């Protein structure tokens, strides 16, 4: 891409975001940081101010492969605390007011 006179003075990342559809400005800034974007044949910074006639080349880096695996989560019915009963847990929870509940105190 050759920078037109009306784009002179723009930051490199802003210029790329306008020129490349479907890629975010922050992602393009990361591409600049890893050297996937050159200006006039050399590495640059996302904040570089462009001049008319600059040659900007963007070579998208390869997509990183990721592997997603399901994680086994134990069911709630199989995780009981030894010695607990529903009557003691009810008694304990009824003596403690819920957050935001009025207790009759000022």
Image (spheres, rainbow, N blue to C red):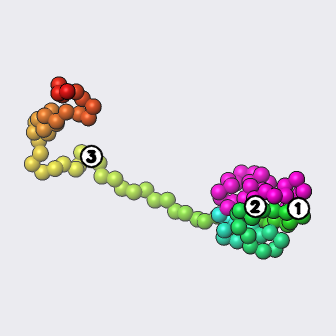
Quadrant in the rendering for residue 16: bottom right
Vertical relation: 74 (above or below) 44: above
| Residue depicted at 12% across the width and 45% down the height | 84
Residue that badge 2 annotates: 12
Quadrant in the rendering for residue 10: bottom right
Q: Earlier in the sequence, mark 1 or mark 2?
A: 2
Range of magenta residues: 1-29
- Residue sitting at the far bottom: 42
How far is the residue under mark 1 from the one under mark 2?
Answer: 12 Å
How far is the residue under mark 3 from the one under mark 1?
Answer: 64 Å
Closer-to-camera residue (96/76): 96
Residue that badge 1 annotates: 52
How far is the residue under mark 3 from the one under mark 2?
Answer: 53 Å
- Residue sitting at the far top: 104
Q: Position of residue 44 (x, y in %)?
A: 73, 70
Q: Is residue 69 left or right of residue 92?
A: right
Q: How many labels does the image show?
A: 3
């Amino acid at each position: 891409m050759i920078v037109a006179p009306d784009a002179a003075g723009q930051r490199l990342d802003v210029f790329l975001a306008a020129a490349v559809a479907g890629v975010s400005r922050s992602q393009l800034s990361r591409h600049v940081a890893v050297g996937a974007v050159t200006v006039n044949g050399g590495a640059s910074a996302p904040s570089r101010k462009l001049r008319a006639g600059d040659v900007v080349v963007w070579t998208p880096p390869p997509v990183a492969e990721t592997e997603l695996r399901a994680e086994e989560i134990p069911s709630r019915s199989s995780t009981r605390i030894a010695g607990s009963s529903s009557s003691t847990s009810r008694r304990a929870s009824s003596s403690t007011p819920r957050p935001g509940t009025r207790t009759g105190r000022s």
